[in-house]
Image (spheres, rainbow, N blue to C red):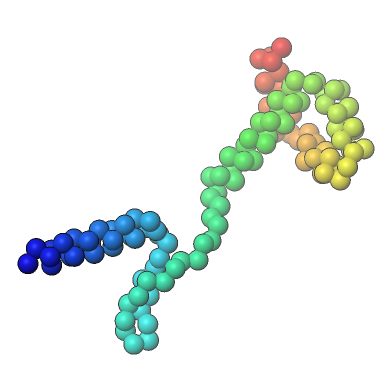
Amino acid sequence: MSGGHKSFDERVRLLERARSRAPRGHVQVAGPDGLVFAKKRRATPTVSARGVLYLIFGFILFKSIAMAQFGPAGYEQRLDELKQGTLIEQVGAVLMQPDRISAGLAIQIAPFLR
């Protein structure tokens, strides 16, 4: 009788271990015959809107700090240097162009950097 409990406990332990390894890695699917079986879930990358907003805000903040640190003339000089560089540097120069939001934020940040 005790041998039956031991094998049952072992099976439960194995099932719990398998379930804890992939908690969201499987989905229950019913086949055409009505049997339910576990099927691996496809790994789909998820991008949250909050993450994208944080990325945009961080980029604008970085650009504003650079503008405040170098000043308008120094910032334009560095952008001109980037425009003469490689393709990646030219793309960076386009992305780092001053805009209203980053310029306004740079004016607010400048007194704290000097």
Residue 101, quarter of the rendered image: top right
Which is nearer the eye, 114 or 84? 84
Expressed as whole percent of the image width and height from the top left, the position of residue 37 reads: 35, 75
In the figure, 51 relative to 19: above or below? above
Residue 59, quarter of the rendered image: top right
- Which residue is pictured at 66% across the width and 31% down the height? 61
In the figure, 60 relative to 35: above or below? above
- Which residue is pictured at 82% across the width and 26% down the height? 75
Q: Residue furthest top?
A: 114
Which quadrant, please, contains the C terminus? top right
Which quadrant, please, contains the N terminus? bottom left
Which is nearer the eye, 81 or 57? 81
The answer, for residue 24, to whether it is visible in the render is: yes
- Which residue is pictured at 37% across the width and 71% down the height? 38
Q: Residue furthest right?
A: 84
Expressed as whole percent of the image width and height from the top left, the position of residue 85 reads: 90, 38
- Which residue is pictured at 37% across the width and 86% down the height? 32
In the figure, 7 relative to 74: above or below? below
Residue 83, quarter of the rendered image: top right
The answer, for residue 104, to whether it is visible in the render is: no
Which is nearer the eye, 37 or 89? 37
